[in-house]
Image (spheres, rainbow, N blue to C red):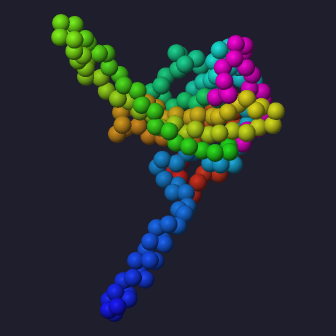
Amino acid sequence: MTRSTCLIHPLLISLLAAGCQALAPSGGYYDSPLQTGAEITVTRELLVPADYARVYLQNGNTESYASMNQYEPFCYFLMDQPIPVVQKIHPGVFRVKKVSLIETQVRRSLPVRLVAFGLFADDGGRSLIAFQSYMTLTAQHQDNVRALVCSGAFDTPPEARPIRLPELQRALGESIRVRATPAPGAFP
């Protein structure tokens, strides 16, 4: 082996080993405002309508999906499944077990069918996305509450951004308190 080969070989091995190391949370732009271990305290009863599995919150008010403004940040509690009667989320403390970031996309367009030619044409609609922080929850005596999902506003891909802690707190309102330690370097 030549001297240069002897020097390069250990260098490559150390670079490959460094690439296999686990990385610490980045605390970056796409991080969730709440991390594992955060506590969410619900101080008033929330009602999930019959045949639904979600109760939406925006600006501290419970909203139906149809009345909510998807161009502003919002949150919703997700139940295990819809049932034919009203489900209740009782006051209590929920702990965040796991956090994921999900990109949700919708397309605003109305296809126009050219019947004579059997073709479809696009009306120039645009895609909208929202980044949603999906937080799996756990609480004593409330096993039917699966997650809290908080979404930044739907917007065009270059303009969409994840929800931030002040926006999450505003969406939940005064009756739902959040106790969280932000991730190091996370955006406020």
Give me the residue at 64% from left, 45% from top. 98
Residue 130 image offset from top left, x and y in percent: 45, 34
Identify the image quadrant of residue 144. top right
Identify the image quadrant of residue 120. top left
- 29 or 120: nearer the viewer: 120
Residue 8 image offset from top left, x and y in percent: 36, 83
Left or right of 25, for residue 14: left
Q: Is residue 56 magenta?
A: no
Residue reaching furthest to the bottom? 3
- 182 or 89: nearer the viewer: 89
Left or right of 108, for residue 121: left
Residue 14 image offset from top left, x and y in percent: 46, 77
The answer to whether 139 is drawn above or below residue 3 in the figure is: above
Give me the residue at 65% from left, 51% from top. 181
Give me the residue at 58% from left, 30% from top. 75
Q: Is residue 79 magenta?
A: yes
Residue 71 image offset from top left, x and y in percent: 45, 27
The answer to whether residue 61 of the structure is visible from this angle is no
In the picture, which quadrant includes the N terminus? Answer: bottom left
- 18 or 73: nearer the viewer: 18
Residue reaching furthest to the front? 1
Left or right of 85, for residue 8: left
The answer to whether residue 52 of the structure is visible from this angle is yes
Residue reaching furthest to the right? 141
The answer to whether 83 is drawn above or below residue 9 in the figure is: above
User: How many numbered marks does the figure carry?
Assistant: 0
Identify the image quadrant of residue 178. top right
Give me the residue at 64% from left, 22% from top. 53
- The magenta segment: 78-95
